[in-house]
């Protein structure tokens, strides 16, 4: 009888103790760990485009899938007006392919610098793309945590049973309310939101913060480019493969360096 009771204890402990059986993966505690240094490498434009297409676009392939995305864009002083505008153009065009192949997507946008601004709530790809191009460059500090907090608040208005995404574009670690940045990202992930991160810069001090913000595994959810001009080139390659008609319409645009 005692043996039977023990077996019951083990059985229910196996069911109820799911988290202990399958512990959530953890990242290195040391911000200078070689694991984080590995994310400093910037792949080729083609490699990044393939990765973006595979990990962001391909999961949408089910016809009629609902998807709600909040773009969170860094408008801090280190970005600069010209690069900010190239980032806007890249995102505006990436948004345009949102409803291709029968998908049902909506987009919202938050920009952050010293503070944060909700630029628009969930809109169709056509309307969101137009509004994206109207956003003004704010300049200032890097209050990433507030941008993520705004995104979480926006997600309360997302559709039932939609796939939920935050797409963060930033050129450096936060410097306002820094202690809240990773916890705010965790709160989004706990709400079943996937976080993709585009980390911009040839070498990023504090890159571990961006790796921790991204969903797990960060190798799938984090992308590296040197400039927002390069991100625009990445987006063009993605559009060329998934939406040739829209790519053809973009051919007159010259992506000159800032």
Image (cartoon, rainbow, N blue to C red):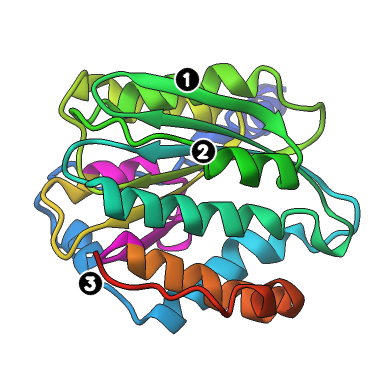
Using the image as rendered, state which of residue 2 and residue 203 is in the foreground: 203
Taking 121 as reference, is 69 above or below it? Answer: below
Place residue 115 in its image quadrant: top left
Q: Residues within 10 Å of mark 1 (few under 14, many from 20)?
A: many
* Magenta residue span: 209-228
Residue drawn at 80 percent across, 54 percent down: 99
- Residue, x 76% and y 77% (percent of image)? 245
- x, y percentage for residue 108? 61, 33
Q: Is residue 201 magenta?
A: no
Quarter holding the N terminus is: top right
According to the image, label 3 marks what residue? Answer: 41
Return the residue at label 1.
Answer: 150
Pointer 2 residue? 134
- Which secondary structure lies at badge 3? loop
Callout 1 secondary element: helix
Q: Give the label, 1 or 2, closer to the camera.
A: 2
Front one among 224 and 87: 87
Sequence-first tag of 1 and 2: 2
- Quarter of the image for the C terminus: give it: bottom left
């Amino acid at each position: 009888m005692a043996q039977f009771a023990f077996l019951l204890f083990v059985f229910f402990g196996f069911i109820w103790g799911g988290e202990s059986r399958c512990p959530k993966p953890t990242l290195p505690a040391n911000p200078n760990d070689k694991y984080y240094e590995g994310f400093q490498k910037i792949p080729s434009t083609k490699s990044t485009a393939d990765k973006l297409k595979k990990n962001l676009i391909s999961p949408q392939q089910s016809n009629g899938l609902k998807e709600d995305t909040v773009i969170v864009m860094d408008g801090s002083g280190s970005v600069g007006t010209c690069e900010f505008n190239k980032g806007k153009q890249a995102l505006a065009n990436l948004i345009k392919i949102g409803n291709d192949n029968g998908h049902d997507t909506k987009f919202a946008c938050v920009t952050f610098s010293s503070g944060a601004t909700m630029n628009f709530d969930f809109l169709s790809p056509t309307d969101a793309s137009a509004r994206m191009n109207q956003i003004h460059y704010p300049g200032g500090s890097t209050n990433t945590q507030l941008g993520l907090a705004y995104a979480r608040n926006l997600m309360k208005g997302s559709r039932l049973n939609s796939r939920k995404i935050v797409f963060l574009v930033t050129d450096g670690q936060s410097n306002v309310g820094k202690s809240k940045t990773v916890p705010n990202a965790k709160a989004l992930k706990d709400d079943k939101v996937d976080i993709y991160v585009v980390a911009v810069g040839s070498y990023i001090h504090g890159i571990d913060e961006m790796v921790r913000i991204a969903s797990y595994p960060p190798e799938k959810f984090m992308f590296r480019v040197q400039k927002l001009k390069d991100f625009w080139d990445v987006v063009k390659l993605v559009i060329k493969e998934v939406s040739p008609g829209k790519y053809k319409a973009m051919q007159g645009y010259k992506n000159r360096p800032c």
